[in-house]
């Protein structure tokens, strides 16, 4: 399942408005990608998005929430909710163009007519799409049922595509609350007119490239065009956390990936994730995930891709 990390502020970086491609033959967009990191910038769009990750893992940004994603995840993303999936470095490179990475559906709430969602019979559907404004991670039977329905859309034509998409939403709307996990906080509000320009994108890109190293504050501040002291104030004001805390989250997230792969012992994982000693690794890992590295591995290793 991955692990939840702490939140990032709604103004943490500029979200780019994405124009979703459409065709005259279809009323909603259905796309399948054989490449990782499609639209891997912080973006939003008025269309609702339903995405199924078939292969790969990495870091998912959803509104003000950060978590690990993995093979099999399905997420319903509400209208204009900023998001992106950043795949782990090198993921699927050897299989590029050979395996299906993701299926992505984009549609609007007016797809079935401007009054459809306001019909009394559709109270649950309307509430579901409102909840999707936080991003909804599907798990368990709900995830499996939606995965099957998305594949039916892929194999269908005409009216059946609309029916199966509607069934996806009904399945989510009526699914067990335990299997549908909201991601962004209830108080998250996207305000694109007030969003910071590309500065945070530059900080994030630099951080993902160097988080396993000792990052001089001067170096990352230069990426943002700020002095070190100004950078610290800036980052804290935009994210609600210190830059060092953010780097710790990236390191722990990478350690989670290595633990699930079960190819290295914990001490190797400690140093490969950017920690200088095992006691520090253990302390920060438990503080962020609520589990020891060994406990995390025991709990989640068997669930990877399940």
Image (cartoon, rainbow, N blue to C red):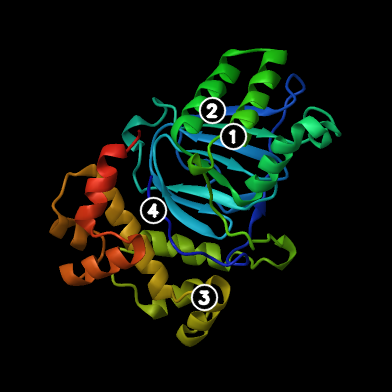
What element does badge 1 sit on?
helix
Verify CB contact (< 8 Å) between mark 2 and mark 1: yes
What element does badge 4 sit on?
loop
Q: CA distance from mark 1 to mark 3?
A: 36 Å
Specify the label residue 3 is tagged with. Answer: 4
Q: Position of residue 291 (x, y in %)?
A: 28, 59
Q: CA distance from mark 4 to mark 3?
A: 23 Å
Horizontal arrangement in the rendering, residue 158 relative to residue 177 (left or right): right
Q: CA distance from mark 4 to mark 1?
A: 22 Å
Q: Position of residue 138 (x, y in %)?
A: 50, 39
Q: In terms of depth relative to the viewer, which is nearer, 293 or 153?
A: 293
Q: Which residue matches tag 2?
A: 146
Nearer the camera: disc 4 or disc 3: 4
Q: Which residue matches tag 3?
A: 235
- Which comes sooner in the sequence, label 4 or label 3? 4
- Which comes sooner in the sequence, label 2 or label 1? 2
Horizontal arrangement in the rendering, residue 133 relative to residue 38 (left or right): right
What element does badge 3 sit on?
helix
What element does badge 2 sit on?
helix
Which quarter of the image is occupied by the N terminus? Answer: top left
Horizontal arrangement in the rendering, residue 112 relative to residue 232 (left or right): right
Q: Which residue matches tag 1?
A: 172
Nearer the camera: disc 2 or disc 3: 2
- Which comes sooner in the sequence, label 1 or label 3? 1
- Which comes sooner in the sequence, label 2 or label 3? 2
């Amino acid at each position: 399942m991955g692990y939840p990390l702490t939140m990032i502020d709604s103004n943490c970086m500029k979200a780019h408005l994405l124009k979703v491609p459409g065709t005259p033959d279809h009323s909603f967009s259905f796309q399948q990608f054989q490449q990782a990191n499609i639209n891997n910038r912080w973006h939003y769009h008025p269309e609702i998005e339903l995405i199924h990750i078939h292969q790969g893992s990495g870091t998912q940004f959803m509104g003000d929430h950060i978590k690990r994603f993995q093979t099999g995840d399905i997420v319903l993303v509400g209208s204009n909710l900023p998001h992106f999936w950043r795949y782990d470095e090198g993921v699927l490179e050897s299989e590029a163009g050979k395996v299906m990475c993701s299926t992505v559906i984009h549609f609007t709430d007016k797809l079935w007519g401007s009054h459809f969602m306001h019909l009394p019979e559709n109270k649950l559907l309307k509430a579901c799409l409102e909840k999707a404004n936080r991003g909804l991670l599907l798990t368990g039977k709900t995830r499996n049922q939606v995965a099957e329905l998305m594949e039916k859309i892929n194999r269908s034509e005409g009216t059946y595509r609309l029916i199966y998409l509607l069934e996806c939403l009904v399945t989510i709307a009526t699914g067990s609350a335990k299997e549908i996990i909201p991601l962004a906080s209830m108080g998250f509000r996207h305000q694109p007119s007030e969003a910071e320009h590309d500065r945070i994108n530059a900080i994030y890109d630099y951080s993902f490239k160097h988080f396993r190293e000792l990052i001089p504050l001067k170096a990352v501040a230069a990426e943002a065009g700020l002095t070190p002291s100004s950078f610290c104030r800036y980052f804290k004001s935009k994210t609600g956390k210190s830059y060092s805390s953010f780097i710790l989250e990236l390191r722990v997230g990478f350690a989670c990936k290595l633990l699930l792969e079960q190819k290295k012992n914990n001490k190797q994982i400690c140093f490969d994730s950017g920690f200088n000693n095992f006691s520090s690794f253990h302390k920060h890992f438990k503080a962020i995930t609520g589990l020891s590295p060994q406990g995390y591995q025991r709990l989640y290793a068997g669930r990877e891709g399940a």
